[in-house]
Each structure stands twice: as structure tokens, then as C-alpha cells.
Image: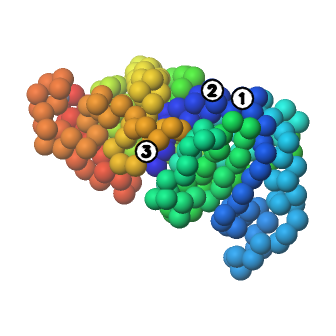
């Protein structure tokens, strides 16, 4: 699943190729993408109207900028409309220059294509959870603090004060902190020297300061590495990221800790595999 650094990577790359390009056509291969119009009760029937009309209004507009709100990717149009994409479980974006042919292997999973003046943007999504919405205006950000911009330790302390959940689950709760998934939560807590099982409400200000500092450093490095490819993550141009070469604990059970030489342990926390060093993380 793409986490914050992967989504940020896509936004940066989208900005380099999409800015100023005109939308020439939009082909929606999967009718489920127009879910805003889906009837309540899940009949799956798409009510024609708003969604199709809003998509049609994008034709002829130019991309002014690409921004990120949590894990949402926003294409800001020069006419004031915003396209908001969320990749969810398995979605990915691929950009091809106009003269590059589509690889036949990705065609069955392609749910949407946006034809632009100099290329084509594809939404590929085998599990079909990704969402695509067209908003009439710029959307005001109403998400929790963004870890890439720094999470104030005081604020973390305040939000965590009433929460007994393990600190790792706290960091992964999208309602509290936006965009940190399993890989980075493990890595951040290792860097901060905090045991992932500790109740969030028991961390001190000094410890939250360590978490905040570690989060920023680890996520920024992951962006610089264009994400972590441990399974299917690819960037906008189909290339793997390189941050997997920097992982200290994730998926390293029984291997030696690079800090103390002890053995990395794997436990299950909140239903997710969790890796940590019992010696370095207290
Ligand atoms: Zn260690």
C-alpha cells in the first residue's frame, strides 16, 4: 500500500510532467470509479449525471499544479476545479510519453486514463479500491498534521493523552496522524528508541520529540529515495524506489540489529506484523 512518502513521490513527479499540460480526453474503464453517484444500498448501478458531467468539464483545462493532502493526490486545474485521487490498497499511477505504447500486461488493471497534450496518465489498480473525484473548487485541507512537515511533540502528547492503544497503532491511525503506514511506523519507532507496544498515553514529551524528529527524518529520506519497494510499489515512471536499502527493522526478524547486534523480533500488533529491537527500543 502506498504510504505518505510514496504519495509525495508521485506528487513531485506529477508536478514535473503535468504542469501546463491540457487534458484532451478522459476514459473511465471502470464504472465503479464514479462511486459518488452510486445508489445507496449498493446496487452498483451508476446514476448518470453529475460525475460524468464534471469529468467532461475537465476536458480542455490545464493542470496548474499537483498538491497533496494527506494521502490524497490533487490535480489543481487552471479553471478552479480539482481532481482528487486516492490510491488506497493497490492503486498506482503511471505516466507515459505520448509516443510510448501501453504494455499489454497492465491493460486489464487500467481503470482510468487521462490523455494530455504530451502524454497519458494511467490509474492501474488490480483491487479496484482507488477513488477518483472531481471537486468544483479547491478543497480546504482538513486533515491532521502532516508528518512530512513535522509533527509538533506537544500536539502528539495532547492527542495521545487519552489513548491507551499501542504507540505504533496510534501512529498508524489515519484519523490522528495522516499517512504513516506499517513500514514507516516500525522504522520511526526504532529510530526513536520506543517499544511499539507501549501505550500511546504513557510517552513523555521528550519521547514524543524523538518520535517527531524520527518521523520527519525517515519520511524525508524515503521521499528522497522515491519510496520503499518491498512488493509492488513503482513510481510514476514505473521505476522501483530505493528506500528498502535503508530499512533497519522492517521484515528483518532474527537478523542482527545494526545498532546493538541483538536479534530483531517480529510480533503482531493490531493485526499487523511489527518488527523491533527489544534491546534498543524501551
Ligand atoms: Zn538493537
Say above or below: 70 vs 40: above
- Please name the residue that numbered disc 1 is placed on: 19
Left or right: 220 with respect to 58? Answer: left
- Please name the residue that numbered disc 3 is placed on: 233
Residue 74 occupies quadrant: top right
User: Mark 2 and 3 residues: CB-CB less than 8 Å, in contact?
Assistant: no
User: Mark 2 and 1 residues: CB-CB less than 8 Å, in contact?
Assistant: yes
Q: Looking at the picture, how far across and down is residue 254, in whole percent? A: 13, 43
Front tag of 1 and 3: 1
Q: Residue at x 75, y 33 (%)?
A: 21
Figure quadrant, ligand 1: top left
Q: Residue at x 60, y 51 (%)?
A: 123
**CA neighbours of label 1 inside 10 A, class few (<14), some (14 to 19), many (20+):** some
Q: Earlier in the sequence, mark 2 or mark 3?
A: 2
Q: Residue 16: which disc?
A: 2
SS of the residue under disc 2: helix
Q: Is residue 184 visible?
A: no
Amino acid at each position: 500500500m502506498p504510504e505518505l512518502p510514496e504519495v509525495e513521490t508521485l506528487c513531485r513527479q506529477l508536478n514535473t510532467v503535468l504542469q501546463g499540460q491540457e487534458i484532451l480526453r478522459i476514459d473511465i474503464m471502470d464504472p465503479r470509479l464514479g462511486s459518488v453517484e452510486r445508489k445507496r444500498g449498493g446496487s452498483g448501478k451508476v446514476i448518470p449525471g453529475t460525475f460524468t458531467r464534471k469529468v467532461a468539464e475537465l476536458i480542455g483545462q490545464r493542470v496548474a499544479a499537483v498538491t497533496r493532502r494527506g494521502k490524497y493526490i490533487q490535480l489543481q486545474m487552471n479553471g478552479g476545479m480539482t481532481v482528487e485521487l486516492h490510491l488506497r490498497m493497490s492503486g498506482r499511477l503511471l505516466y507515459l510519453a505520448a509516443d510510448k505504447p501501453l504494455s499489454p500486461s497492465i491493460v486489464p488493471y487500467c481503470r482510468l486514463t487521462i490523455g494530455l497534450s504530451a502524454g497519458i496518465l494511467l490509474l492501474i489498480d488490480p483491487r479496484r479500491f482507488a477513488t477518483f473525484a472531481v471537486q468544483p473548487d479547491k478543497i480546504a485541507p482538513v486533515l491532521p498534521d502532516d508528518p512530512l512537515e513535522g509533527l509538533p511533540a506537544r500536539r502528539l502528547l495532547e492527542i495521545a493523552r487519552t489513548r491507551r492503544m499501542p504507540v505504533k497503532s496510534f501512529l498508524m491511525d489515519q484519523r490522528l496522524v495522516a499517512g504513516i503506514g506499517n513500514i514507516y511506523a516500525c522504522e520511526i519507532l526504532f529510530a526513536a528508541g520506543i517499544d511499539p507496544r507501549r501505550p500511546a498515553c504513557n510517552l513523555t514529551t521528550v519521547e514524543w520529540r524523538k518520535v517527531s524528529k524520527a518521523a520527519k527524518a525517515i519520511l524525508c529520506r524515503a521521499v528522497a529515495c522515491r519510496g520503499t519497494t518491498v512488493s509492488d510499489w513503482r513510481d510514476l515512471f514505473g521505476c522501483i524506489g530505493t528506500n528498502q536499502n535503508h530499512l533497519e527493522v522492517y521484515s528483518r526478524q532474527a537478523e542482527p540489529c545494526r545498532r546493538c547486534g541483538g536479534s530483531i523480533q517480529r510480533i503482531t500488533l493490531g493485526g499487523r506484523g511489527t518488527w523491533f529491537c527489544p534491546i534498543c527500543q524501551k
